[in-house]
Structures are given as structure tokens and as C-alpha cells.
């Protein structure tokens, strides 16, 4: 019921446009991915603290970035900065394989518990530093942390043909969501994400 109310609010904001993303948001209970003391706020459209100076993104941001990623069922997807595991769980409803990369060990352990509680077997959470922590190429790459334009462009080297990268990229004093697809970079909404951390 609460998930449905949240989805209706996100649709009203034009954050959710596709049937597939709508269904993913109905199936993934955000309350699993927030700390106990914030569970009463789990269905509000705002970021919430998850510890370690990190947050779980506002649902409308997760929805918009998921829509931009255009995930297909056979896709191999990696998320950098997987935090609580919420975005990875949404992606798991849409893709065949999802890998979440998180630099903070405490968040890695917590997100693994969250993913297990939510029942996802096609998600792996790994500890490490960005794309260096994973092998191979991906159909979709999403960053849930603010990155440089250089890192954004570098991520394209890890894409399969027809791949897509979505990331909040640092500009002059702000971050803007950029998408790389079909050889072109497009710009979308201004956002505020936790910055990419080096080990």
C-alpha cells in the first residue's frame, strides 16, 4: 500500500514513465533499505541518512536515473556507490545480473543483509573502489555518487556495444546527471550526490 502511494507520487512528478520501472518500485520495499529509526519516513520522497556520511537517494532520483538507464532483461549492470542496496534492488527487478560496488565496508555488509532480506539472488555487492573492483564489460553502468567528467568518460571503456552510462557529473559548483548512449552525451537534472570516494 505504501509502495503504491509512493509510486503514484513519483508518476505525478514524471519521475516514473515506464510500466517496467513502475512495477519495480511496487515490488521493492524501500523500508528494508533504511535504518530502523528512519523507517517511518521510508516512503517519503527525500534522501535519508544510512550512516557513514552517506544517504539513500530520494525515490524520484532513483526513478529518474533508472528510467534513463533503459535496462533490458538480459543486461549485466553495475552500480558504483551502492550504499544501502536500494538502487541495486530496483535494477534487479529489471536486469539479469546486478553488481553493486561500495567503498565503505560497513555499508557493504549492511547492503548485503538488505539485499538478502529483500530476496534478490541476482545481485552481488562487492567492496572496492569504483569500476576497478569489477571485471569485464557491462550493458549498463550507473554511478550513485558524484564523479568527474574524466571518470564519466572513462566508464565508457567498460561498456559493451549499445551500452549506457548514467551518472551525476561535477560541473561548476554543482552536479548534473549525464547520460552516454549511442555515442552521445545528454544532460538531465541537477542533483546533489555524495562525492565519489577514493580508498
Image (spheres, rainbow, N blue to C red):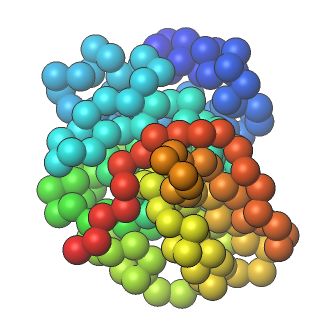
Q: Position of residue 100 (x, y in %)?
A: 41, 63
Q: Quadrant of residue 21?
A: top right
Residue at 46% x, 31% y: name it.
Answer: 58
Closer to the camera, 155 or 66? Answer: 155
Q: Quadrant of residue 46?
A: top left
Q: Position of residue 174 (x, y in %)?
A: 51, 45
Q: Is 45 on the left-hand or right-hand side of 182?
A: left
Q: Is 154 on the left-hand or right-hand side of 84?
A: right
Residue at 28% x, 51% y: name it.
Answer: 111
Is residue 161 shown to the viewer in this render?
yes
Q: Is 124 on the left-hand or right-hand side of 67?
A: left
Give the answer, above or below, for where 44 lies relative to 178.
above
Q: Is 118 on the left-hand or right-hand side of 77?
A: left
Residue at 18% x, 26% y: name it.
Answer: 36
In this figure, what is the number of numbered marks?
Answer: 0
Q: Position of residue 129 (x, y in %)?
A: 32, 75
Furthest-front residue in this view = 172
* Quarter of the figure with the C terminus: bottom left
Closer to the camera, 31 or 155? Answer: 155
Give the answer, above or below, for where 74 lies relative to 81.
below
Q: Quadrant of residue 65?
A: top right
Residue at 43% x, 17% y: name it.
Answer: 44
Give the answer, above or below, for where 25 lies relative to 73.
above
Q: Position of residue 29 (x, y in %)?
A: 42, 30
Is residue 96 shown to the viewer in this render?
no
Give the answer, above or below, for where 180 lies relative to 146.
below
Amino acid at each position: 500500500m505504501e509502495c503504491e502511494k509512493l509510486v503514484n507520487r513519483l508518476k505525478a512528478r514524471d519521475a516514473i514513465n515506464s510500466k517496467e520501472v513502475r512495477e519495480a518500485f511496487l515490488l521493492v520495499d524501500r523500508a528494508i533499505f533504511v535504518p530502523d529509526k528512519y523507517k517511518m519516513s521510508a516512503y517519503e520522497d527525500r534522501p535519508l541518512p544510512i550512516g557513514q556520511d552517506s544517504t539513500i537517494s530520494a525515490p524520484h532520483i532513483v526513478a529518474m536515473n533508472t528510467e534513463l538507464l533503459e535496462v533490458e532483461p538480459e543486461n549485466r549492470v553495475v552500480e558504483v556507490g551502492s550504499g544501502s542496496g536500494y538502487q541495486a534492488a530496483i535494477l534487479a527487478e529489471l536486469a539479469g545480473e546486478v553488481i553493486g560496488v561500495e567503498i565503505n565496508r560497513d555499508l557493504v555488509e549492511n547492503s548485503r543483509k538488505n539485499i538478502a532480506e529483500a530476496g534478490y539472488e541476482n545481485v552481488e555487492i562487492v567492496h572496492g573502489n569504483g569500476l576497478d573492483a569489477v571485471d569485464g564489460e557491462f550493458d549498463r553502468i550507473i554511478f550513485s555518487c558524484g564523479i568527474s567528467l574524466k571518470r564519466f568518460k572513462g566508464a565508457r571503456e567498460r561498456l559493451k556495444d549499445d551500452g549506457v552510462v548514467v551518472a551525476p557529473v561535477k560541473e561548476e559548483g554543482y552536479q548534473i546527471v549525464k547520460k552516454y548512449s549511442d555515442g552521445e552525451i545528454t544532460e538531465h537534472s541537477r542533483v546533489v550526490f555524495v562525492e565519489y570516494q577514493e580508498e
